[in-house]
Image (cartoon, rainbow, N blue to C red):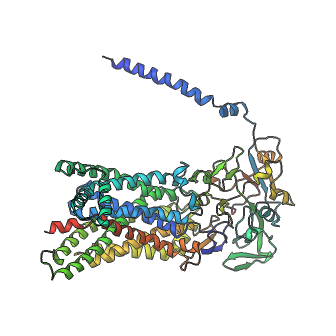
């Protein structure tokens, strides 16, 4: 007859003994060891946008559409520019006609449904442009909700889409708080900005960064303390979009305003 | 053309990639799964809780739930941009996604309903198979039927009292397991919406519970509706055949049974309806009271843009009117019929207001999108994501139910009792 005391004793011993080999398997994984020894090594792409420098010319949108083969006249785009106009009477107007592709050459604000509001320059308190693109979130909700794992996060932080695996359910489009995703008009699968992954892996800059004449857009490796982008993010006051969703976005903005969402 | 552009009209500040991507088929999806779950819960009221008065309704709603089951998947397939890859949800599920659970929950539930049906109708399968076997000169149709019913028996020909008692036990257990699974099937449809943190209207932990309650309401209502229609046809047939045969049940007798069933089922409908309304109102009041950042745009949608859809069509026609109709004393068949049609409409509008309403405002919180349902199918896309596709989905369970009625004696029980 086994006593309660000896049963408990043996049970604890057994559990402890079993857990040792299991924990070794957990620690000794090659990825984990590598990570432990190389805390700062590796690449984590991040974007830096200086809204003070953006003039809303639309060259970035044009370059992006051409580079990434998004039909030029289709009303979707991987990157876009928003215009914000604050009036003296407290009203705020914002628009992004064709994603700002053709630049903002008129003082008329696009209200949708074919209506426009002309703004007198004298009424304006402040006005500015905000370029937008995928935030390559550290905690991407689009990856979480994909039912087949067709969208995934690469080890350098960029969220990618497997076009041959996407079923086109649109759940990722619904889950993105930033509205960066859409269905590719030709391929009919989910589509979004990937920081021009094919270019950054060859040491080139994304098409929009190269196209910007004013240096409003920058890309960098946030794990490299010597990277100019990292230096700005660490040393200056920057902000991200919609941090309340817990997505940890990696597109940093200089000169963000409360109205920008 | 970009997917969604055809039926979306943008107003004020909307992001360039925003469209109403989830359209009418995603309204149909929770509506249809809700009917499945609701019909099953109704049948379980008899099998598990032994509510004897619901016996006729129970058998019928179980079969109906099975007929609705394949239809729950149809809207999803019609909505996919790459339907040929839809199977990957079952083959390579990515389990952090709520949709990935669909395959498992759906097939578990399907198996439970199918096996419960088998236990309920096993005696019938055996009887039919044996009588066809004994038949001397079988024509080709009889031979096919014989093969079919023999297959349905699965080789279990024992219909002794003890064996049938075992069947009843199995039905009870399956119905018992089925209730939580049915609730899960639909609760998780609510979770698909409720867990989208990017959508201010959808994101609430109440969503699955609201979905389950309205599901049970719609399931019961549809079963009542179909039951009434079938009984009316029966009465009509009896009246016509009365002159030729005298041992048929009279139409008054059928009416008596029908009214009794309807009055009892209506009580359960009312109970679940009140529960569903309370939860929906709680959600609305809570949003208004807490008034977080998103409330400004939500208020303008709920009390402004979608006022007619929400307060007049959903709460008024879909909830308040049927409440009055059912609570008024001395419920008649005709009044019940009008009531359940309103209830079904109300639940449909609730799905519509969640799915379409949730996409009717922009992520900028400063713009709106309006949905225009494609009525005339001009191409494949406007067919499947338009009125025609929705009607096709809505009609399919009735066709399947008619087919099942050819195999199963769904309504024979009550006429036996009448003798």
Residue B270: where, in percent of width, then height?
31, 67
Asked where in the image residue B68 lies, by quadrant, the reply is bottom left
- How many circles with numbers are drawn on the protein? 0
- Taking A110 as reference, is A30 above or below it? above
Residue closest to the far right = A213
Residue B29: where, in percent of width, then height?
47, 64
Q: Does residue B126 show up?
A: yes
Residue B319: where, in percent of width, then height?
38, 72
- Taking A233 as reference, is B83 above or below it? below
The structure residue drawn at horizontal position 33% and vertical position 17%, both measured from the top left corner, is A2
Residue closest to the far front = B137
Q: Does residue B275 show up?
A: no
Pick the quarter of the image with the N terminus of chain A.
Answer: top left
Q: Nearer the viewer, residue B241 or B178?
A: B241
The structure residue drawn at horizontal position 72% and vertical position 58%, both measured from the top left corner, is A133
Judge from the rendering whether residue B316 lies leftward or rightward of residue B244; answer left or right: right
Q: Nearer the viewer, residue A74 or A98?
A: A74
Residue B360: where, in percent of width, then height?
57, 70
Judge from the rendering whether residue B414 lies leftward or rightward of residue A209; answer left or right: left
Pick the quarter of the image with the C terminus of chain A.
Answer: bottom right
Asked where in the image residue B53 lies, by quadrant, the reply is bottom left
Judge from the rendering whether residue B375 lies leftward or rightward of residue A209; answer left or right: left
């Amino acid at each position: 007859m086994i006593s309660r005391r000896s049963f408990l004793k043996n049970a604890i011993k057994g559990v402890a003994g079993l857990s040792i080999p299991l924990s070794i398997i957990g620690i000794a994984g090659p990825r984990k060891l590598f990570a432990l020894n190389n805390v700062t090594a590796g690449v984590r792409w991040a974007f830096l946008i200086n809204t003070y420098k953006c003039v809303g010319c639309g060259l970035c949108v044009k370059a992006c559409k051409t580079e990434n083969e998004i039909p030029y006249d289709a009303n979707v785009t991987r990157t876009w520019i928003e215009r914000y106009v604050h009036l003296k009477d407290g009203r705020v107007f914002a628009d992004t006609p064709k994603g700002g592709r053709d630049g903002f050459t008129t003082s008329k604000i696009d209200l949708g449904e074919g209506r426009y509001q002309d703004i007198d320059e004298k009424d304006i308190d402040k006005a500015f442009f905000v370029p937008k693109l995928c935030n390559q979130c550290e905690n991407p909700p689009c990856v979480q909700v994909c039912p087949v794992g067709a969208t995934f996060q690469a080890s350098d932080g960029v969220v990618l889409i497997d076009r041959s695996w996407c079923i086109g359910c649109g759940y990722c489009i619904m889950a993105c708080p930033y509205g960066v995703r859409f269905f590719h008009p030709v391929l009919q699968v989910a589509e979004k900005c990937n920081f021009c992954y094919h270019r950054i892996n060859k040491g080139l800059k994304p098409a929009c960064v190269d196209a910007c004449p004013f240096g409003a857009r920058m890309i960098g490796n946030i794990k490299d303390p010597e990277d100019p982008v990292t230096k700005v993010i660490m040393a200056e006051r920057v902000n991200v979009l919609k941090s309340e969703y817990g997505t940890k976005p990696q597109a940093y903005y200089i000169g963000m305003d409360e109205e920008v969402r | 053309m970009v997917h969604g552009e055809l039926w979306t009209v943008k107003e004020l500040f909307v992001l360039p990639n925003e469209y109403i991507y989830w359209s009418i088929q995603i309204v149909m999806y929770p509506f249809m799964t809700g009917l499945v779950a609701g019909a099953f819960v109704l049948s379980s009221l008899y099998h598990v809780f032994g509510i004897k008065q619901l016996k006729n309704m129970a058998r019928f709603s179980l079969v109906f739930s099975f007929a609705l089951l394949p239809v729950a998947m149809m809207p999803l397939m019609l909505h996919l941009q790459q339907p040929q890859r839809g199977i990957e949800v079952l083959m390579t599920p990515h389990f952090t996604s709520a949709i990935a659970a669909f395959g498992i929950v759906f097939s578990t539930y399907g198996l439970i309903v199918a096996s419960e049906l088998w236990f309920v109708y096993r005696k019938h399968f055996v009887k039919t198979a044996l009588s066809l076997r004994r038949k001397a000169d079988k024509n080709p149709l009889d031979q096919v039927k014989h093969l079919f019913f023999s297959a349905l028996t699965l080789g279990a020909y024992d219909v002794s009292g003890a064996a049938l008692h075992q069947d009843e036990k199995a039905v009870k257990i399956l119905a018992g397991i089925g209730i939580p699974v049915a609730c899960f099937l639909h609760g998780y449809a609510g979770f698909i919406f409720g867990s989208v943190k990017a959508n201010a209207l959808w994101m609430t932990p109440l969503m699955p519970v609201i979905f389950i309650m309205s599901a049970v309401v719609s399931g019961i209502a549809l079963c009542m509706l179909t039951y009434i229609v079938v009984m009316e046809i029966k009465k009509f047939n009896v009246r016509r055949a009365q002159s030729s045969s005298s041992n048929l049940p009279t139409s008054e007798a059928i009416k008596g049974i029908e009214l009794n069933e309807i009055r009892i089922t209506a009580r359960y409908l009312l109970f679940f309806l009140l529960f569903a309304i309370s939860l929906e109102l709680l959600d609305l009041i809570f949003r208004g009271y807490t008034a977080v950042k998103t409330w400004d745009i939500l208020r303008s949608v709920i009390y402004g843009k979608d006022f007619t859809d929400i307060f007049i069509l959903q709460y008024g026609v879909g909830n308040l009117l049927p409440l009055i109709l059912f609570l008024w004393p001395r419920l008649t068949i005709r009044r019940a019929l009008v009531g359940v049609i309103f209830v079904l409409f109300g639940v449909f509008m609730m799905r519509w207001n969640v799915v379409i309403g949730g996409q009717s405002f922009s992520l900028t919180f400063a713009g709106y999108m309006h949905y225009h349902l494609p009525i005339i199918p001009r191409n494949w896309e406007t067919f499947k994501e338009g009125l025609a596709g929705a009607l096709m989905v809505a009609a399919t369970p009735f066709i399947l139910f008619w087919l099942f009625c050819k195999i199963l004696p769904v309504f024979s029980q009550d006429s036996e009792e009448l003798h």
